[in-house]
Image (spheres, grey):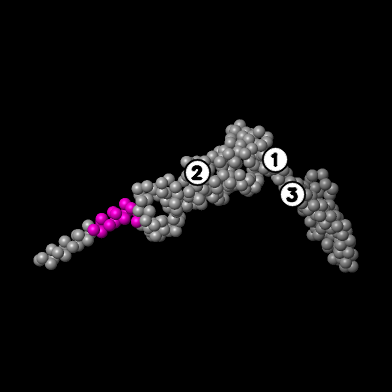
Amino acid sequence: MNFIAAVIGGFFGLLFVAGLLVSFGQLFQLWRVVPERTVIVYTFFGKVVGQVDQPGLFLPLFQFGPKALLFPLFGKTYTVPTLLHQSYLRNQLVNSEEGAPMGVGVWFEMYVNDPAAYLFRNSDPMGSLKANVATAVVKQLSNLKLDVLLEDRDALSRKVREEVSPTSTQWGFALGSTYIRKVAFRDKGMINEIQRKVVNRLRQVTAAMKQAGENTVAIIHSEADKQASQRLGQAQAVRPEVVGQALAEIQREPEVAEALFRLLEISATLKSSGKVVLAESIGSGLILSLPSGGAAVSAVRPVV
Protein backbone atom coordinates (compact mmCIF):
# COMPACT_ATOMS: atom_id res chain seq x y z
CA MET A 1 0.00 0.00 0.00
CA ASN A 2 2.85 2.38 0.80
CA PHE A 3 4.39 1.63 -2.61
CA ILE A 4 1.16 2.36 -4.46
CA ALA A 5 0.71 5.59 -2.51
CA ALA A 6 4.30 6.59 -3.36
CA VAL A 7 3.73 5.87 -7.06
CA ILE A 8 0.55 7.92 -7.13
CA GLY A 9 2.19 10.74 -5.19
CA GLY A 10 5.19 10.71 -7.54
CA PHE A 11 2.92 10.77 -10.59
CA PHE A 12 0.99 13.81 -9.42
CA GLY A 13 4.24 15.44 -8.33
CA LEU A 14 5.67 15.01 -11.84
CA LEU A 15 2.51 16.48 -13.29
CA PHE A 16 2.82 19.50 -11.00
CA VAL A 17 6.48 19.99 -11.85
CA ALA A 18 5.79 19.60 -15.59
CA GLY A 19 3.01 22.17 -15.36
CA LEU A 20 5.36 24.59 -13.60
CA LEU A 21 8.04 24.05 -16.26
CA VAL A 22 5.55 24.62 -19.08
CA SER A 23 4.21 27.77 -17.42
CA PHE A 24 7.74 29.02 -16.84
CA GLY A 25 8.68 28.32 -20.46
CA GLN A 26 5.60 30.09 -21.80
CA LEU A 27 6.15 33.05 -19.46
CA PHE A 28 9.74 33.59 -20.61
CA GLN A 29 9.04 32.37 -24.17
CA LEU A 30 11.70 29.69 -24.11
CA TRP A 31 10.21 28.20 -27.27
CA ARG A 32 7.84 29.31 -30.02
CA VAL A 33 6.02 27.47 -32.78
CA VAL A 34 6.13 29.43 -36.06
CA PRO A 35 3.23 28.63 -38.46
CA GLU A 36 3.51 28.57 -42.24
CA ARG A 37 3.63 31.95 -44.03
CA THR A 38 4.20 33.77 -40.70
CA VAL A 39 7.07 35.94 -39.44
CA ILE A 40 7.74 36.68 -35.74
CA VAL A 41 9.49 39.99 -35.12
CA TYR A 42 11.38 40.49 -31.79
CA THR A 43 11.96 43.94 -30.30
CA PHE A 44 14.09 44.79 -27.26
CA PHE A 45 13.81 48.22 -25.64
CA GLY A 46 11.91 49.46 -28.70
CA LYS A 47 14.45 48.25 -31.26
CA VAL A 48 14.13 45.34 -33.66
CA VAL A 49 16.67 42.70 -32.71
CA GLY A 50 15.63 39.94 -35.11
CA GLN A 51 12.90 38.03 -36.83
CA VAL A 52 12.06 34.40 -37.47
CA ASP A 53 10.49 33.31 -40.74
CA GLN A 54 11.19 29.57 -40.81
CA PRO A 55 8.14 27.49 -39.83
CA GLY A 56 8.46 24.97 -37.02
CA LEU A 57 9.76 24.91 -33.44
CA PHE A 58 12.02 27.82 -32.57
CA LEU A 59 14.18 28.33 -29.42
CA PRO A 60 15.05 32.02 -28.86
CA LEU A 61 17.91 31.19 -26.45
CA PHE A 62 19.93 29.59 -29.28
CA GLN A 63 19.60 32.69 -31.51
CA PHE A 64 19.53 35.67 -29.15
CA GLY A 65 21.41 34.25 -26.15
CA PRO A 66 20.54 34.88 -22.45
CA LYS A 67 18.89 38.21 -23.20
CA ALA A 68 16.04 36.22 -24.73
CA LEU A 69 14.89 35.61 -21.12
CA LEU A 70 14.32 39.37 -20.79
CA PHE A 71 12.16 39.70 -23.91
CA PRO A 72 8.89 39.20 -21.97
CA LEU A 73 9.92 41.98 -19.54
CA PHE A 74 11.64 44.58 -21.75
CA GLY A 75 10.70 43.51 -25.24
CA LYS A 76 7.79 42.56 -27.41
CA THR A 77 7.06 40.06 -30.16
CA TYR A 78 4.90 40.71 -33.19
CA THR A 79 3.33 38.04 -35.37
CA VAL A 80 3.03 39.17 -38.99
CA PRO A 81 1.21 36.94 -41.54
CA THR A 82 2.79 36.95 -45.00
CA LEU A 83 -0.15 35.36 -46.79
CA LEU A 84 -1.28 36.66 -50.15
CA HIS A 85 -4.02 39.27 -49.68
CA GLN A 86 -6.50 40.25 -52.37
CA SER A 87 -8.59 43.38 -52.47
CA TYR A 88 -11.08 45.01 -54.83
CA LEU A 89 -11.84 48.73 -55.02
CA ARG A 90 -15.22 49.53 -56.55
CA ASN A 91 -16.48 52.56 -58.47
CA GLN A 92 -13.41 54.78 -58.50
CA LEU A 93 -14.65 57.98 -60.17
CA VAL A 94 -12.78 58.85 -63.39
CA ASN A 95 -13.74 61.35 -66.09
CA SER A 96 -13.02 60.49 -69.69
CA GLU A 97 -11.74 62.95 -72.28
CA GLU A 98 -15.30 63.33 -73.59
CA GLY A 99 -16.48 64.31 -70.10
CA ALA A 100 -18.29 61.05 -69.32
CA PRO A 101 -18.20 60.08 -65.60
CA MET A 102 -16.92 56.51 -65.40
CA GLY A 103 -16.74 54.08 -62.48
CA VAL A 104 -13.59 51.94 -62.44
CA GLY A 105 -13.20 48.74 -60.42
CA VAL A 106 -9.60 47.65 -59.78
CA TRP A 107 -8.49 44.32 -58.31
CA PHE A 108 -5.03 43.83 -56.82
CA GLU A 109 -3.12 41.41 -54.62
CA MET A 110 -0.25 42.00 -52.21
CA TYR A 111 1.80 40.31 -49.49
CA VAL A 112 4.16 41.46 -46.73
CA ASN A 113 7.83 41.10 -47.72
CA ASP A 114 9.35 43.40 -45.05
CA PRO A 115 7.66 42.78 -41.67
CA ALA A 116 9.65 45.49 -39.84
CA ALA A 117 8.63 48.17 -42.35
CA TYR A 118 5.07 46.86 -42.28
CA LEU A 119 4.93 47.23 -38.49
CA PHE A 120 6.75 50.51 -37.84
CA ARG A 121 6.75 52.71 -40.98
CA ASN A 122 3.01 53.12 -41.30
CA SER A 123 0.29 52.87 -38.68
CA ASP A 124 -2.27 51.63 -41.24
CA PRO A 125 -0.32 50.14 -44.16
CA MET A 126 -3.29 48.29 -45.64
CA GLY A 127 -5.52 51.36 -45.71
CA SER A 128 -2.68 53.49 -47.07
CA LEU A 129 -2.03 50.98 -49.85
CA LYS A 130 -5.69 50.99 -50.89
CA ALA A 131 -5.73 54.78 -50.89
CA ASN A 132 -2.55 54.80 -52.96
CA VAL A 133 -4.06 52.40 -55.50
CA ALA A 134 -7.21 54.53 -55.75
CA THR A 135 -5.10 57.66 -56.29
CA ALA A 136 -3.03 55.92 -58.98
CA VAL A 137 -6.20 54.82 -60.78
CA VAL A 138 -7.53 58.38 -60.87
CA LYS A 139 -4.14 59.74 -61.94
CA GLN A 140 -3.47 57.26 -64.72
CA LEU A 141 -7.01 56.91 -66.12
CA SER A 142 -8.33 60.47 -65.96
CA ASN A 143 -8.89 62.39 -69.22
CA LEU A 144 -8.33 59.35 -71.42
CA LYS A 145 -10.47 58.66 -74.45
CA LEU A 146 -13.51 56.52 -73.82
CA ASP A 147 -12.45 53.78 -76.24
CA VAL A 148 -9.04 53.58 -74.50
CA LEU A 149 -10.71 53.15 -71.10
CA LEU A 150 -12.95 50.39 -72.42
CA GLU A 151 -10.38 48.49 -74.52
CA ASP A 152 -6.80 49.00 -73.21
CA ARG A 153 -7.25 47.59 -69.72
CA ASP A 154 -4.05 45.52 -69.71
CA ALA A 155 -1.82 48.50 -70.46
CA LEU A 156 -3.67 50.70 -67.95
CA SER A 157 -3.37 48.01 -65.27
CA ARG A 158 0.41 47.89 -65.75
CA LYS A 159 0.60 51.68 -65.41
CA VAL A 160 -1.32 51.57 -62.12
CA ARG A 161 0.96 48.84 -60.76
CA GLU A 162 4.10 50.76 -61.75
CA GLU A 163 2.71 53.84 -60.02
CA VAL A 164 1.94 52.06 -56.73
CA SER A 165 4.86 49.60 -56.41
CA PRO A 166 7.61 52.03 -55.14
CA THR A 167 5.42 53.39 -52.34
CA SER A 168 4.12 49.95 -51.34
CA THR A 169 7.71 48.70 -51.03
CA GLN A 170 8.46 51.43 -48.49
CA TRP A 171 5.56 50.18 -46.38
CA GLY A 172 6.75 46.57 -46.45
CA PHE A 173 4.33 45.41 -49.16
CA ALA A 174 5.06 43.69 -52.44
CA LEU A 175 2.30 44.51 -54.90
CA GLY A 176 1.34 41.52 -57.05
CA SER A 177 -1.09 41.32 -59.93
CA THR A 178 -3.15 44.44 -60.57
CA TYR A 179 -6.02 44.46 -63.02
CA ILE A 180 -8.81 46.83 -63.97
CA ARG A 181 -11.80 44.51 -64.01
CA LYS A 182 -14.68 46.88 -64.64
CA VAL A 183 -15.25 50.18 -66.41
CA ALA A 184 -18.87 51.34 -66.23
CA PHE A 185 -20.90 54.48 -66.81
CA ARG A 186 -22.18 56.26 -63.70
CA ASP A 187 -24.70 58.62 -65.33
CA LYS A 188 -28.10 56.89 -65.72
CA GLY A 189 -29.17 59.27 -68.49
CA MET A 190 -26.06 58.41 -70.48
CA ILE A 191 -26.64 54.70 -69.88
CA ASN A 192 -30.20 55.00 -71.21
CA GLU A 193 -29.00 56.96 -74.25
CA ILE A 194 -26.34 54.35 -75.03
CA GLN A 195 -28.90 51.58 -74.68
CA ARG A 196 -31.24 53.41 -77.06
CA LYS A 197 -28.47 53.86 -79.63
CA VAL A 198 -27.43 50.23 -79.32
CA VAL A 199 -31.03 49.05 -79.81
CA ASN A 200 -31.44 51.29 -82.86
CA ARG A 201 -28.17 50.08 -84.30
CA LEU A 202 -29.21 46.47 -83.78
CA ARG A 203 -32.48 47.17 -85.54
CA GLN A 204 -30.63 48.76 -88.45
CA VAL A 205 -28.25 45.85 -88.71
CA THR A 206 -31.13 43.36 -88.53
CA ALA A 207 -33.05 45.24 -91.23
CA ALA A 208 -29.95 45.40 -93.44
CA MET A 209 -29.34 41.67 -93.02
CA LYS A 210 -32.99 40.94 -93.82
CA GLN A 211 -32.90 43.16 -96.92
CA ALA A 212 -29.64 41.57 -98.06
CA GLY A 213 -31.22 38.13 -97.67
CA GLU A 214 -34.31 39.16 -99.62
CA ASN A 215 -32.12 40.62 -102.38
CA THR A 216 -30.11 37.43 -102.58
CA VAL A 217 -33.28 35.34 -102.77
CA ALA A 218 -34.68 37.65 -105.49
CA ILE A 219 -31.46 37.31 -107.48
CA ILE A 220 -31.63 33.53 -107.17
CA HIS A 221 -35.29 33.51 -108.28
CA SER A 222 -34.59 35.80 -111.23
CA GLU A 223 -31.64 33.69 -112.27
CA ALA A 224 -33.76 30.56 -112.03
CA ASP A 225 -36.56 32.21 -114.04
CA LYS A 226 -34.01 33.30 -116.63
CA GLN A 227 -32.60 29.81 -116.99
CA ALA A 228 -36.10 28.33 -117.12
CA SER A 229 -37.12 30.82 -119.84
CA GLN A 230 -34.01 29.96 -121.82
CA ARG A 231 -34.78 26.27 -121.55
CA LEU A 232 -38.43 26.79 -122.55
CA GLY A 233 -37.37 28.94 -125.50
CA GLN A 234 -34.96 26.27 -126.61
CA ALA A 235 -37.70 23.65 -126.24
CA GLN A 236 -40.17 25.76 -128.25
CA ALA A 237 -37.56 26.28 -130.95
CA VAL A 238 -36.83 22.58 -131.18
CA ARG A 239 -40.50 21.50 -130.98
CA PRO A 240 -41.48 22.23 -134.62
CA GLU A 241 -38.51 20.28 -135.86
CA VAL A 242 -39.29 17.33 -133.62
CA VAL A 243 -42.99 17.40 -134.51
CA GLY A 244 -42.19 17.78 -138.21
CA GLN A 245 -39.87 14.79 -138.12
CA ALA A 246 -42.56 12.75 -136.36
CA LEU A 247 -45.24 13.78 -138.87
CA ALA A 248 -42.86 13.00 -141.73
CA GLU A 249 -42.40 9.52 -140.36
CA ILE A 250 -46.19 9.11 -140.00
CA GLN A 251 -46.92 10.37 -143.55
CA ARG A 252 -45.06 7.40 -144.92
CA GLU A 253 -48.09 5.34 -143.90
CA PRO A 254 -51.22 7.12 -145.28
CA GLU A 255 -53.71 5.00 -143.36
CA VAL A 256 -51.91 5.60 -140.10
CA ALA A 257 -51.72 9.32 -140.81
CA GLU A 258 -55.46 9.54 -141.62
CA ALA A 259 -56.42 7.63 -138.46
CA LEU A 260 -54.13 9.83 -136.35
CA PHE A 261 -55.57 13.09 -137.66
CA ARG A 262 -59.14 11.88 -137.12
CA LEU A 263 -58.25 10.83 -133.60
CA LEU A 264 -56.70 14.23 -132.87
CA GLU A 265 -59.80 15.94 -134.28
CA ILE A 266 -62.12 13.92 -132.02
CA SER A 267 -59.86 14.55 -128.99
CA ALA A 268 -59.95 18.29 -129.62
CA THR A 269 -63.73 18.20 -130.01
CA LEU A 270 -64.19 16.32 -126.73
CA LYS A 271 -61.95 18.76 -124.87
CA SER A 272 -64.08 21.69 -126.02
CA SER A 273 -66.12 23.51 -123.36
CA GLY A 274 -69.28 23.34 -125.53
CA LYS A 275 -71.78 20.49 -125.76
CA VAL A 276 -71.76 18.06 -128.64
CA VAL A 277 -75.20 17.52 -130.22
CA LEU A 278 -76.02 14.81 -132.76
CA ALA A 279 -77.86 16.13 -135.85
CA GLU A 280 -79.58 14.42 -138.74
CA SER A 281 -77.55 12.40 -141.11
CA ILE A 282 -76.47 14.00 -144.37
CA GLY A 283 -75.05 11.79 -146.96
CA SER A 284 -72.92 9.14 -145.47
CA GLY A 285 -72.12 10.69 -142.05
CA LEU A 286 -73.44 12.52 -138.97
CA ILE A 287 -73.21 16.27 -138.38
CA LEU A 288 -71.85 17.39 -134.99
CA SER A 289 -72.80 20.89 -133.93
CA LEU A 290 -71.49 22.97 -131.05
CA PRO A 291 -74.25 24.98 -129.31
CA SER A 292 -71.72 27.51 -128.04
CA GLY A 293 -71.33 29.00 -131.48
CA GLY A 294 -68.66 26.72 -132.87
CA ALA A 295 -68.81 25.49 -136.48
CA ALA A 296 -70.31 22.11 -137.32
CA VAL A 297 -67.85 19.23 -137.59
CA SER A 298 -68.36 16.06 -139.64
CA ALA A 299 -68.32 12.75 -137.81
CA VAL A 300 -65.38 10.46 -138.25
CA ARG A 301 -67.39 7.41 -139.20
CA PRO A 302 -70.53 6.84 -141.36
CA VAL A 303 -73.95 6.09 -139.90
CA VAL A 304 -75.23 2.63 -140.56
> Label 1 is placed on what type of residue?
Gln
The answer to whether residue 285 shows anywhere in this view is no
Tell me if 221 is positioned left or right of 158 in this view.
Answer: right
Residue 291 position within the rendered picture, expressed as x and y whole percent measured from the top left: 79, 45
Q: Is residue 247 above or below residue 224?
A: below
Placement of the N terminus among the 4 image quadrants: bottom left
Residue highlighted by disc 1: 204
The mark closer to the camera, 2 or 3, is 2
- Which one is nearer the viewer's eye here, 64 or 196? 64
Q: Nearer the viewer, mark 2 or mark 1?
A: 2
Q: Which one is earlier in the sequence, the residue at label 1 or at label 3?
A: 1
Instruction: Place residue 251 in its image quadrant.
Output: bottom right
Circle 1 Cα neighbour tier, 10 Å, few/some/many (<14 / 14–19 / ≥20): few
Which residue: 84% across, 58% down?
235
Q: Amino acid at mark 3?
A: Val
Q: Secondary structure at mark 1?
A: helix
Near-viewer residue (35 or 115): 115
Q: Which residues are magenta?
A: 17-30
- Residue occupying image coordinates x 88% and y 66%: 249
Helix, strand or loop at disc 3?
helix
The image's mark for residue 121 is 2
Q: Tell whether label 1 touches label 2 (CB within 8 Å).
A: no
Instruction: Give the numbered dot on residue 217.
Output: 3
Question: In whole angstroms, how far apart are the C-alphas of marks 2 and 1?
Answer: 61 Å
Q: Is residue 25 magenta?
A: yes
**What's the CA distance linking mark 2 and mark 3?**
76 Å
> How busy is the neighbourhood of tag 2: few (under 14 within 10 Å), some, or many (20 plus)?
few
In the picture, measured across the screen, residue 160 lies left or right of residue 112, that is: right
